[in-house]
Image: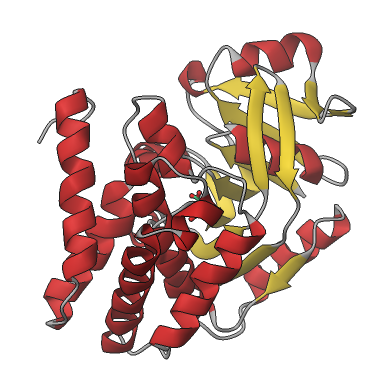
Amino acid sequence: MEVLVYGAGALGSLIGGLLARAHDVTLVGRDPHMRRIRGDGLRIDGEIEARVRPRALTDGTHRGADLALVTTKAYDTDAAARALATGEYDAVCSLQNGLTEERLVAALDPTVLAGTASYGALLAEPGRVTCTGTGEVVVGSLAGGRDPLAERVGAAFDEAGIEATVAADMPRRRYEKLAVNAGINGPSALARLANGATLDGPGGEVAREAAREVARVARADGVDLGGDEAVAAVERVADDTAANRSSMHEDVAEGRRTEVDAIYGAVVDRADRFGTAAPTCRTLASLIRAWELGEGVRES
Ligand code: KPL
C-alpha cells in the first residue's frame, strides 16, 4: 500500500517508519528532520533504518496515495487538509489529539477515518526517533459501525507488525480519548507534573472531574460513555504512562502553542451546543489560553 504520513514529527515518523516494513511510505514533515532523513535515513531507537521517502512541508503539492495518515498537531489540521486536497487518496485517517476529524471532512472528498495511536515517541534529534512506549493503533468509521476502508487500513497496520484494532464503536472511543486528554493534559501542564504524579496529587480531582464532564458531553451527543468509565480510562493511561510528560506539558515546558482548542475548546463548544455544563474544562481552557497569550504564542 502507498501511505503518506502528513505531519511527521515524533509519532508520525515512528508510525511511518514501522509501516515502511511492509509499505511504500512517504513522510511529510519539517526540516531539519526531513533533510537528515534524506541524507542519513530514519533511525528508530538507533537501530532500524526505515526505508521512507522524506518530503518537506514546503515541497509543494502531493500526488496522492492509498492512505494519508494525519499526525500534525491539532492546530495544523486546516493546513494539512489544504495540502492533502491537492492529491488523491482512498482514505484519510487522523491519528491526532482532539476532535479534528470534522475539519478534515469539511475540506476533503475522501472518506475520513478516526484513529488513535497509543505509542510514545520522542524526536531525539533530527532523523532519530525513540519509541518510549509500544501500544496499539485503533481505526474506525467516524459514524461508528463496520467500514470496509477501516478494515483495509487495519490490515495494512497488521501487515507491518503494528497491533491494530478496527473498532465499530469509534464514536465512543473518540470521546474516551478526549476524556483522557482532557483529564491528563491540562492539569499536568499547569502543575508541570508527569502523568502519574498528576493523578496522584491534588490535580487528580480536577483530572477526574474533567473526564466526567467529557462523558456528560458524549452522552448529550448520543454516545454511551459513563462518567466512571471515562475516569477509569484516565487512571489507566496515567498509570501506563506514569513517568511520561503529556504532550501539553511538553508544549508548555518548551514555550510552544498547545492543543487547548482541539481538546478543551471542543469540549466547551459541544457542552454549549448540547446545553451541558463543563465548568472544569472551561476553566482549564481559560487558564491554558491565558498562558498562551502571555507567552505570545496565541493571537486572541
Ligand atoms: O495523548 C496523550 C498526550 O500526551 O497528548 C496522553 C499521553 C494519552 C495523555 O493525555
What residue is shown at x 26% (from left), y 66% (from top)? 267
Q: How is the image coloured?
A: secondary structure
Q: Position of residue 226 (x, y in %)?
A: 42, 89
Q: In front: 190, or 62?
A: 190
Residue at the top extreme, as displayed: 39
What residue is shown at x 59% (from left), y 45% (from top)? 244
Residue 293: which quarter of the image? top left
Q: Position of residue 289 (x, y in %)?
A: 19, 42
Q: In front: 36, or 283?
A: 283
Give the quadrant of the C terminus: top left
- Regarding residue 198, the answer to whether it shows in the image is yes
What residue is shown at x 52% (from left), y 21% (from top)? 30
Side of 88 where 250 appears, left or right: left
Residue 18: which quarter of the image? top right
* Residue 175 versus residue 40 in the image, above or below: below
- Regarding residue 95, the answer to whether it shows in the image is no
Side of 289 where 41 appears, left or right: right
Q: Position of residue 1 (x, y in %)?
A: 77, 50
What residue is shown at x 52% (from left), y 35% (from top)? 7
